Structures are given as C-alpha cells and as structure tokens.
Image (cartoon, rainbow, N blue to C red):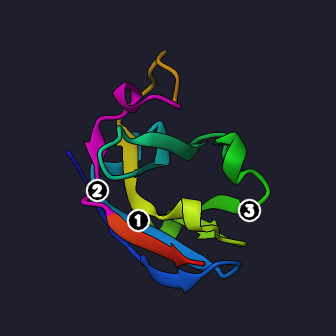
Amino acid sequence: QVQLVESGGGLVQAGGSLRLSCAASGRTFSIYAMGWFRQYPGKEREFVGCIKWGVRATYYEDSVKGRFTISRDNAKNTLYLQMNNLKPEDTAVYYCTAARSYTPRSLTTQVAYDYWGQGTQVTVSS
C-alpha cells in the first residue's frame, strides 16, 4: 500500500503561484509513476500532469504546459506541482496519485493509477 498526503493549496490572485506537495509513504519503492489530476465541481477528474519515476519523464495537459512543473524529491518521497501564472480556470481540487507498478494504460487516465490523496483546494481569484 502507498499513502499519499497533499498540501500547499490555498487562495491566490490570478498571475500568482502556488506549490503543491504530495508526501508518499508505504511501499514507495515500486512506484512506476505519479501524477496530478484536478476536479471541477460536478465534473470528472482531469489529467494535469505526471512523471515516470524511473526515467523522470514528465507529461502535461496542454492548458498547463509552460505554467506548471512537476518535480520530485526522492529522499523525501515527495512529489511537487509548481503552478505559476495561475488563472481563475485553474480553480479546482487537486489530487495526487500514484501507479504502484508498470501499466500499459495511458497515464493521462484515472484508471492507470492505484492510489489517491485526499485532495487540496486551489482557488484563483480574478
């Protein structure tokens, strides 16, 4: 099992920045990939970005490319989402997620992941 705990959400003005953290614990040695999804009220969770743990390759949803950056700290077993130039449409609950082992499923889909954090609210005011 892997436990994920997000932190760092909050209220920020448009154009500002926030950094989300996701601390992983448990059987973290087998993690294949970790990612971030976000959810708008009444909508399904949507892909934001992810990182393949072994090769450190990152992938982003088009609307956040150039503004959001995913990184990790192996020593701390922590995933980060640096969000710059935030827009009101980035307002959502952000979830950290992890795939426990290799999966042929697209990492842009929820079904590729096995563990989820509790979510953290990000609110961007105009």
At 46% from the left and 74% from the top, the residue drawn is 123
Q: Quadrant of residue 125?
A: bottom right
Numbered mark located on residue 22 in the image: 1
Q: Nearer the viewer, mark 3 or mark 2?
A: 3
At 53% from the left and 75% from the top, the residue drawn is 124
Residue matched to label 3: 67
Q: For the residue labelled by badge 3, is the local secondary structure a helix, a strand or a loop? A: loop
Q: Which of marks 3 and 1 is in front?
A: 3
59 horizontally vs 10: left or right: right
Q: Distance between the residues labelled 3 and 2?
A: 23 Å
Based on the picture, tell me whether residue 111 belongs to the magenta stretch. yes
Q: Is residue 104 above or below residue 75?
A: above
Question: What's the magenta region?
Answer: 108-119
Q: Do tag 2 and tag 1 residues touch (Cβ < 8 Å)?
A: yes
Of 7 and 84, which appears nearest the observer?
Answer: 84
Q: How far apart are marks 3 and 1 (CA)?
A: 19 Å
Query: Given the current orientation, which residue lies at the most extreme right position?
Result: 66
36 horizontally vs 97: left or right: right
Of 81 and 24, which appears nearest the observer?
Answer: 81
At 71% from the left and 41% from the top, the residue drawn is 62
**Local crowd at mark 1 within 10 Å, few (<14), some, or many (≥20)?**
many
**Local crowd at mark 3 within 10 Å, few (<14), some, or many (≥20)?**
few
Residue matched to label 2: 117
Numbered mark located on residue 112 in the image: none
Q: In which quarter of the image is residue 53?
A: top right
Residue 73 visible in the picture: no
Q: Where is residue 46 in the image (x, y as percent from the top left)?
A: 46, 40
